[in-house]
Image (cartoon, grey):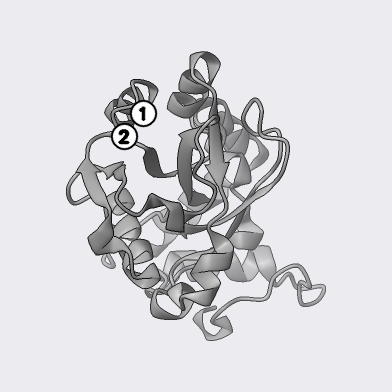
């Protein structure tokens, strides 16, 4: 499933687009985090990275600073709905800003093809009436290449069983988007042989080629 970029501002903020963040304090995540890296890449592509003041802080601390008006915006790279964001929104109304149009125009997807389109449906957060179009990176299950093929295969079978999906969804709401049909979305590294075996069975059953997936790199499977 995906971890989506979510640019958050107070609902009453005059900020409408990322370009309005020039000279603003923007909390972008902890040093070395995927959130901070994606923010730097995005704002560099826009050409305004040098014009904002990045604040390196955890998601919880960033949202606390937003609610105290210590920062003008918060950048999160997380699954949705995000619980910390939901909690903040209950007492301090927030608003999300679309990122996709600027990402396309700036060549962001060309420069960083591991990021893919994401859509946060309207109603995901209280007060969010419209879909928010943004981008995401993929949450990947990474294994040592020496791990037994059958172990990887059986692990994936369990995860994508009805019981496995129900369990992970109950523990992590953002994982509701977990879908074997999206198994290759954003994947730019080699697949483990056990994953190849599982995906061949799941996506290309013996009764005919599945029409539900267009792999970015069909040769992987």
Q: Nearer the viewer, residue 87 or 2?
A: 87
Is 48 left, or right, of 89 in this rendering?
Answer: left
Q: Position of residue 205 (x, y in %)?
A: 73, 69
Which quadrant would residue 125 be assigned to in this image? Answer: top right
Q: Position of residue 87 (x, y in %)?
A: 48, 19
Whether residues under marks 2 and 1 lie with C-beta atoms below 8 angstroms apart, the answer is yes
The residue that appears at 62% across and 57% down in the rendered structure is 180
Q: Position of residue 200 (x, y in %)?
A: 61, 71
The residue that appears at 82% across and 73% down in the rendered structure is 207
Which quadrant would residue 169 be assigned to in this image? Answer: top right
- In the drawing, what numbered circle is on residue 71? 2
Residue 65 makes an appearance in the image: yes
The relative height of residue 116 versus residue 124 in the rendered view (above or below) is: below
Distance from label 2 to label 1 (Cα)?
A: 5 Å
Residue underneath mark 1: 66
Q: Going by the picture, which residue comes out furthest to the top?
A: 91
């Amino acid at each position: 499933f995906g971890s989506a970029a979510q640019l958050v501002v107070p609902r009453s903020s005059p900020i409408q687009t990322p370009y309005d963040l020039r000279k603003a304090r923007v909390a972008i995540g902890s040093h070395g985090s995927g959130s901070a890296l994606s923010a730097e890449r995005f704002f560099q592509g826009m050409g305004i990275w040098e014009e904002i003041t990045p604040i390196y802080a955890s998601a919880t601390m960033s949202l606390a600073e937003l609610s105290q008006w210590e920062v003008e915006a918060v950048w999160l790279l997380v699954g949705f709905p995000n619980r910390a964001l939901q909690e903040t929104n209950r007492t301090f109304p927030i608003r999300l800003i679309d990122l996709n149009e600027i990402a396309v125009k700036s060549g962001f997807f060309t420069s960083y093809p591991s990021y893919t389109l994401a859509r946060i449906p309207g109603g995901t957060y209280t007060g969010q009436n419209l879909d928010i179009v943004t981008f995401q990176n993929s949450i990947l299950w990474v294994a040592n290449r020496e791990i037994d093929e059958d172990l990887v295969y059986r692990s994936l079978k369990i995860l994508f069983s009805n019981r496995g999906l129900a369990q992970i969804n109950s523990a992590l709401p953002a994982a509701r988007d977990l879908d074997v049909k999206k198994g290759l979305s954003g994947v730019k590294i080699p697949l483990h042989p056990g994953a190849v075996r599982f995906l061949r069975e799941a996506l290309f059953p013996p009764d005919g080629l599945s029409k539900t997936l267009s792999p970015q790199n069909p040769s992987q499977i």
